[in-house]
Image (cartoon, rainbow, N blue to C red):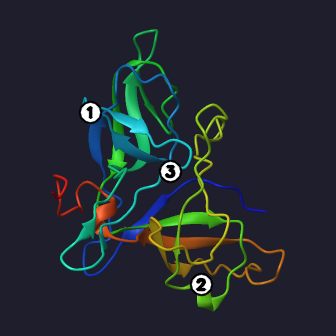
Amino acid sequence: MATAYGLRPVTHGGYQYNTGGFEEYPIDPSYATQIFNGDIVKLTNDYGVVRNTNTEVPTPLILTNAPAVTIPTNQALGVFVGCRYVDTNGTPQFAQRYPGSGTEAFAFVVTDPNAVFRIHSDDEWAEADLGNNVNPVIVANATPGGDTSTGNSSTKVTSNDDVADAALRIIGVMRDGTDITSAAATCDLLVRWSSPSCTLYGSPISEPVA
């Protein structure tokens, strides 16, 4: 049975080049929590990367009665796909996960709001799931939030049912010949952000609307 691994970049939507490109951002030097490959991350007020914790999933820009909008909350910087840091012995390290300690630490983050990700779902697949919005289930920091042997995140989807204003939109499923449709089956979904405004780079609004 497949296990969770967070959000894994697959491709880009639309006509853009197929690339797993990322950007490098400093990890908050005061942050002492592990960050795993596939974790959703955000920026602190000091512009350092930290892990989104527990149920902190981004929300999109929502149009209500015109011209009113509901402003996005907890916007993501993107998805963490590795890091570099200097360990306690003074040795530079490139790693799948950030261990929660080290100096000169930088995160590799997929920031493109049009990126497509693969994520594990505990639910079986049905064709009606296509287009549903779902929220990832994010494991709390203290658990920890991933597998320390593989460095992969425990973030996953537990249900493919549609959730209003959720962070991710299902755009497909991995079809590898295994059973994904029976009641006891699980599947790996292809998802993208439900709205570009879930991410800092995709948001058209930087200040709250009065």
Local packing at callout 1 (Cα closer than 10 Å; few below 14, some 14-19, many 20+) is few
Residue, disc 2: 129
Front residue of 57/104: it is 57
Residue, disc 3: 38
Front residue of 16/200: it is 200
Q: Which mark is residue 99?
A: none
- Of the numbered discs 1 and 2, the one sitting upstream in the chain is 1
Residue visible at 63% across and 31% down? 142
Q: Point out the frontmost of discs 2 and 3.
A: 2
Q: CA distance from mark 1 to mark 2?
A: 37 Å
Q: Secondary structure at mark 2?
A: helix
Picture coordinates of residue 48, whole percent (x, y): 30, 32
Q: Find out whether the residues at labels 2 and 3 contact each other: C-beta distance under 8 Å.
A: no
Q: Is residue 179 left or right of residue 115?
A: right
- Of the numbered discs 3 and 1, the one sitting upstream in the chain is 3
Q: Amino acid at mark 3?
A: Gly
Q: Is residue 120 left or right of residue 66?
A: right
Figure check: 198 above or below 87: below
Q: Secondary structure at mark 1?
A: loop
Residue visible at 30% across and 76% down? 64
Q: Find out whether the residues at labels 3 and 1 contact each other: C-beta distance under 8 Å.
A: no
- The residue positioned farthest toward the right in the image shown: 184
Residue, disc 1: 45
Local packing at callout 2 (Cα closer than 10 Å; few below 14, some 14-19, many 20+) is many
Figure check: 110 above or below 106: below
Q: Is residue 181 left or right of residue 63?
A: right
> Which quadrant is home to the N terminus?
bottom right
Q: How many marks?
A: 3
Q: Find out whether the residues at labels 1 and 2 contact each other: C-beta distance under 8 Å.
A: no
Picture coordinates of residue 166, whole percent (x, y): 47, 67
Residue 115 appears in which quarter of the rendering?
bottom left
